[in-house]
Amino acid sequence: MIAELEALRGKVATLGLSAFLGAVPAGTTPPAAYYLIELASGARPDDLPLSDATSAWDLAVRVKSVGITPEQVIIYLDAARMLLVPLGRVAALTVTGRGVTLVFERHEADYLDRDVTPHRYVSLDTFALSSVPDGTEDGS
Amino acid sequence: MAFVDDHEIRAFAVDLRSAPQRVVDKIPAVIKKGAVEIKKQMVEEMGASFWFKGAKRSISFDILDGGFTAEIGPVSEPGQVTGDLASVAYFGGSRGGGTVPDPVGALNADAPRMEKALADLLGGVL
């Protein structure tokens, strides 16, 4: 599961902003604008069970953009959505040995995090991430 | 983790609109009852959070689309503090992680009751 999430994180990072998996690392001062790739369940990616190469699974994941203005986070999230699902809703994600599909589910919210200084705006989407081993009916 | 695929729901809603008027007239009450139950669970879940219980007041619902749609959740426009707090509770802050159960759980919890209520309505005309 980590490989798929890392692939998602890496793809988002090609947009030129930092992209973190799960959370901003403790002790790190984050940049002014960045992305977070999170599990919708609230679990930390490091706590996910290790899946063997033959298992198929799906997860709800969130792509979150963080920035200093509401316009900025919306623009950055739009850019991530266009990159991840350029045809609108469904796209493949390249992971060695797996057939990985990413489906845009919905835009969740835009809001202000007042617990940090300076305050940061947040905008996030939920995607369904499905992974099957190559060579299976649904795999590539 | 549960997923909400609302395409079938939307298709079902279109089907419902083509039902006899006496059935159509009863659908908004079913939708509103569902909205009340979902809001109730969301308020309970938010209220159970030590950090975010103050945000439960921001959870409400609007009935839209002539009673065929309910939009349930916290007021979340930027600048409205309690709504922003609820969003942080569900989706986490700028550094990660939410701690209050995803509202989709409340939706899924009520779905069987709502499906049965709608099926019962339609069953009366079949």
Image (cartoon, rainbow, N blue to C red):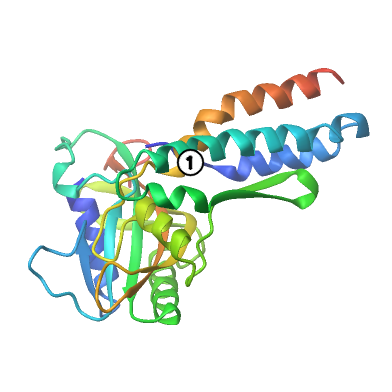
- Element at label 1: helix
Identified at 72% across, 23% down, the residue is B119
Identified at 86% across, 38% down, the residue is B18
Res. A56 image quadrant: top left
The one nearer the camera, A80 or B2, is B2
Count of residue discs: 1
Res. B8 image quadrant: top right
| Residue B72 seen | no
Q: Is residue A52 above or below residue A121?
A: above
The one nearer the camera, B69 or A20, is B69
Determine crowd level at label 1: few under 14, some 14-19, many 20+ residues with C-alpha closer than 10 A: many
Disc 1 target residue = B43
Locate residue B52 relative to residue B68 in the image: left or right: left
Q: Is residue A41 above or below residue B19?
A: below
| The N terminus of chain A - image quarter | top left
Locate residue A125 relative to residue B107 in the image: left or right: left
Across and down, in percent, residue A114 comes to: 33, 69
Identified at 46% across, 43% down, the residue is B103
The one nearer the camera, A75 or B100, is B100
Identify which amino acid the numbered label 1 is placed on: Val
Q: Residue furthest left?
A: A27
